[in-house]
Amino acid sequence: PMLERLPMDSFKSLLAKGAVIYACETCCYNRGLSEGADFYKGVQIVGVPTVAAMASQCDRLLTL
């Protein structure tokens, strides 16, 4: 079914509140996404080692 609100709508709101949002470079590549063309300004593209380091250092990790 069609979503009334897309996940990216939430991302815009979170960015406006000062959240830092990262996108995995490998995941983006595998989905055919292009930095600058398919992301909102402020979403940072990071490599797998950075994602792994964040996961090992946080209390909670949200992934989509």
Image (spheres, grey):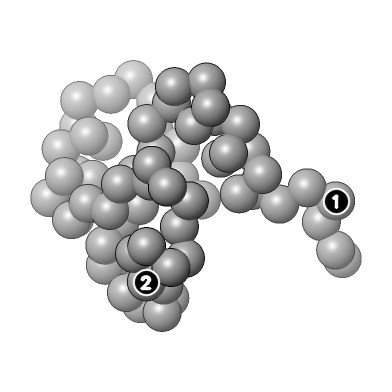
Question: Amino acid type of disc 2?
Answer: Ser
Viewer-closest of 63 and 20: 20
Query: Between disc 2 and disc 1, whose residue precedes?
Result: 1
Residue 52's x, y, as percent? 19, 44
Assign a secondary structure to mark 2. Answer: loop
Question: Amino acid type of disc 1?
Answer: Glu
User: Disc number at residue 18?
Assistant: none
Relative to residue 45, is residue 42 drawn left or right? Answer: right
Residue 14's x, y, as percent? 54, 29
State which mark lies toward you, 2 or 1.
Answer: 2
- Asked if the residues shown at circle 2 and circle 1 are in contact, with their CB atoms under 8 angstroms apart, the answer is no
**Which residue is found at the position 45% from the left and 57% from the top?**
39
User: Disc number at residue 34?
Assistant: 2
**Which residue is found at the position 37% from the left and 31% from the top?**
20
Residue 32 lies in quadrant: bottom left
Relative to residue 48, is residue 18 drawn left or right? Answer: right
Q: Which residue is mark 1?
A: 4
Residue 51's x, y, as percent? 23, 45
**Which residue is found at the position 37% from the left and 62% from the top?**
36
Assign a secondary structure to mark 1. Answer: loop
Residue 53 lies in quadrant: top left
Relative to residue 23, is residue 37 drawn left or right? Answer: right
